Image (cartoon, rainbow, N blue to C red):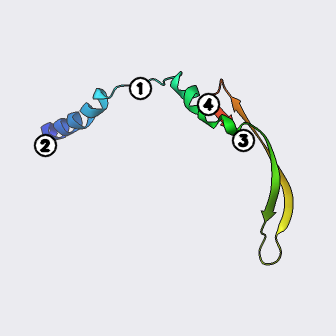
């Protein structure tokens, strides 16, 4: 019984040890993010807010989109 449990545990741990650790490609990530450059800037436009039955509330909404962390993330 103990041998069976030991073999089972050994078999379950083997695939975990065989995994390779992936390191991020820090040159490919900013290149991929540059595809979203058209979003960067200040945006403003009309918006409609529906709050239950009745007429929608019309308002002006604005957003600012910018890169952060050496172009690795985009904040909206």
Residue 71 placement (x, y as % from top left) = 64, 27
Q: Earlier in the sequence, mark 4 or mark 1?
A: 1
Horizontal side, residue 23 vs residue 14: left or right: right
Q: CA distance from mark 4 to mark 3?
A: 15 Å
Q: Mark 1 packing: few (<14 Cα in 10 Å), some, or many (20+)?
A: few
Q: Going 31% across and 32% down the picture, which residue do you hit? A: 16
Residue 61 placement (x, y as % from top left) = 82, 52
Q: Which residue is mark 4?
A: 34
Q: Earlier in the sequence, mark 2 or mark 3?
A: 2
The answer, for residue 1, to whether it is visible in the render is: yes
Circles 4 and 1 in contact, beta carbons < 8 Å: no
Q: How many marks?
A: 4
Disc 4 is placed on an element classified as: helix
Q: CA distance from mark 4 to mark 1?
A: 23 Å
Q: Going 58% across and 26% down the picture, which residue do you hit? A: 30
Q: Which residue is mark 2?
A: 1
Query: Nearer the observer, disc 4 or disc 3?
Result: 4
Residue 17 placement (x, y as % from top left) = 29, 27
Disc 3 is placed on an element classified as: loop
Q: Which residue is mark 1?
A: 22
Q: Quadrant of residue 75?
A: top right
Q: Which residue is mark 3?
A: 76
């Amino acid at each position: 019984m103990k041998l069976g449990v030991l073999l089972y545990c050994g078999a379950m741990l083997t695939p975990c040890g065989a995994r390779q650790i992936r390191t991020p490609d820090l040159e490919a990530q900013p290149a991929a993010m540059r595809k979203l450059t058209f979003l960067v800037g200040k945006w403003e436009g009309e918006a409609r807010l529906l709050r239950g039955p009745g007429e929608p509330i019309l308002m002006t909404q604005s957003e600012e989109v910018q890169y952060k962390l050496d172009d690795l993330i985009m904040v909206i």
